[in-house]
Image (spheres, grey):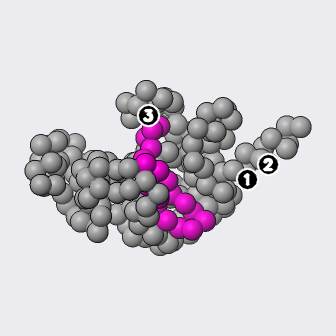
Amino acid sequence: MLTQTAAAQGRTIISSHGNTAVWEDQANGQRALYAASAIDAGACIAEFHAAAIMHTPSYLTVQKDDDEHIHLSPAHLQYVNHSCAPNAFFDTTYMSLIALKPIAAGEEITFFYPSSEWDMAQSFSCRCGSEQCLGEIKGAAHLPADVLIRYHLTDYINRKIQQSCSERH
């Protein structure tokens, strides 16, 4: 069934990982992580750890602190793409990928990059297609508080916001 769903969307399943699978778009070769089965809101999709710790960000790292950017392990989690209407969250305190809402089998798993990234190594023009799409994605440091309040943010990003507010007052 899942293979048929992927094929109907022009994608091929290239690897399976419990309740998730990496799909590859046959037209452009881009990869993304999809739910292999239904995932309940609040469920742990996957636990992760640091395969490597970097002192500067890259497009493949998740930020844990000012100078701590981790490469994710298991490696298939690098295929969780950005959305301005995410269905998952990288909890860097408990090192778990958490479902923010129910995720149907065959649905792409996405997260809001500024939820963990203060100032991204590579900004980009978002084309997520959601009604709340923010356009240019640069990191939480570049977004107003009234936007950030709509999202689940890592403890690190929440600390940075508090620090930023304190410095302005």
Q: Examine the rendering and report whether any part of residue 71 can be seen.
A: no
Q: Mark 1, residues whose alpha carbon is within 10 Å: few (<14), some, or many (≥20)?
A: few
Helix, strand or loop under label 3: loop
- The residue positioned 34% from the left and 63% from the top of the image is 76
Whether residue 30 is situated above or below residue 95 in the rendered picture: above
Total number of numbered labels?
Answer: 3
Q: Which residue is mark 2?
A: 163
x then y, percent, for residue 63: 58, 58
> Which residue is at the front of the view, 101 or 118?
101
x then y, percent, for residue 29: 22, 48
Q: Examine the rendering and report whether any part of residue 169 can be seen.
A: yes
Amino acid under disc 1: Arg
Q: Which residue is mark 1?
A: 159
Question: Which residue range is magenta in the image?
Answer: 83-101
Whether residue 94 is situated above or below residue 167 in the rendered picture: below
Helix, strand or loop under label 2: helix
- Left or right relative to 18: residue 153: right
The numbered mark, 3 or 1, whose residue comes first in the sequence reads 3
> Which residue is at the front of the view, 10 or 104?
104
Q: Which residue is mark 3?
A: 126
Q: Are marks 2 and 1 in contact (CB under 8 Å)?
A: yes
> Which residue is at the front of the view, 66 or 163?
163
Amino acid under disc 3: Cys
Q: Are marks 3 and 1 in contact (CB under 8 Å)?
A: no
x then y, percent, for residue 22: 27, 58
Whether residue 103 is situated above or below residue 150 in the rendered picture: below
